[in-house]
Image (cartoon, helix red, strand yellow):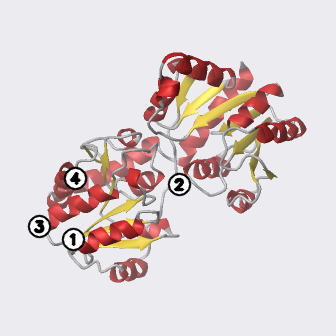
Amino acid sequence: MIKVLNIISDSNIGGAGRCVLTFLKYFDRSRFQVRVVVPTGSLLIPEINRLGIKTIETDGIAEKSLSLEGIKKLKKIIKSSGCDIVHTHGNMSGRIAARQCGKKVVYTRHSVFPVSPKISKGLGKVINGAVNMHYSDAIIAVAEAAKENLTDTGIKPSAVRVILNGVEPQKRAGEATVRALREKYGIEDGDFTAGIMARIEDVKGHIYLIEAAEKILETNKNLKVLIIGTGSLEDSLKRTVKEKGLEKNIIFTGFVNNVNEILSILDIQVNASFGTEATSLSLLEGMSLGIPAVVSNYGGNPGVITHGENGYIFKLRDSGDLAKYMKKLMDDREVYSYMQKRSVEIFNEKFTAEIYAGNIEKVYTELMNK
């Protein structure tokens, strides 16, 4: 039995937390014992406990990668846990504490973002790379773009393994639910519905979808766009939509609990990120239902969407290019049907929760066999 202690610093449930939850649901309990260290009061706690996994709460790590308090408290937890491996999710305090306790250390990089010149050039790059490799026995990147982030900061490419995220397949909502949601959002028979599921922040690129929709609506009035989620730019974007007179066609849904239900009324998904994007879990969930996507050529998007197979990739921050590919899917039913089929096939080949959990288990097993 290999004993693994996961450490995550998230107080809310974000992408990293969802990946941890997926692994916890699908790992082989006959071979691994897994516990999770979380910040005191984290929203992850009831979700993890529901899976029958023990959580250990601690102060000093919430939303912090590195703190002296965190290192001190995590050392006590690691020593008393009797674990073989410490798996950290963006938490440097956990890696330092684990190394000081003589444990094997796994580090997963869940994010992609522009790298500071302080750690991507000269001596800063050398030091950063050396430190991260010293405090990690295995480094996992959730996308090729995440690996590039790491290697740009001095970590050797050979030290990084790419393990793509995986999710549980979604189930389509029933006819009554679909009918009620379409009525709620004003989606009529014959409408083509696009959705973007992301925090409403500048780097997620919602404005480019709004501009693309405006171009399409000049000639095709049957487009509906759902902006799903909340964020700091929500009010600003609502004003923009109102000024353009597009309120009937671009609808803000707010926060949505039942993802499968909202996915069930979409024809395509859009991801327009330009500043942070690793592997979009909502894109994967949509793929499991046969929903093609049009995505920006940024971050992990090209690792999820294969141009011309399960969707299209448009030029970064180019609303005209986005509109072009959205129209292709709207106008060519044969291409759309092909992409529906390929979306499900590619999901089953690469992005299931079972594949993801199995790949993480291989890392643990290899470390213990060294």
Q: Residue at x 15, y 57 (%)?
A: 332
Percent from the top left, x then y, of residue 292?
31, 54
Dot 1 falls on a residue whose secondary structure is loop
How many residues crowd mark 3 within 10 Å: few (<14), some (14–19), many (20+)? Answer: few
Residue designated by label 3:
218
Q: Residue at x 17, y 57 (%)?
A: 327
Compared to residue 121, the image places residue 317 above or below, namely: below
Compared to residue 316, the image places residue 171 above or below, namely: below
> Please, what is the three-letter code of the amino acid marked with disc 3?
Glu
> Please, what is the three-letter code of the amino acid marked with disc 1?
Lys
Cα–Cα span, label 3 and label 4? 14 Å
Compared to residue 179, the image places residue 321 above or below, namely: above
Q: Residue at x 43, y 79 (%)?
A: 177
Dot 4 falls on a residue whose secondary structure is helix
Which label belongs to residue 168?
Answer: 2
Q: Earlier in the sequence, mark 4 or mark 1?
A: 1
How many residues crowd mark 2 within 10 Å: few (<14), some (14–19), many (20+)? Answer: some
> Please, what is the three-letter code of the amino acid marked with disc 2?
Glu
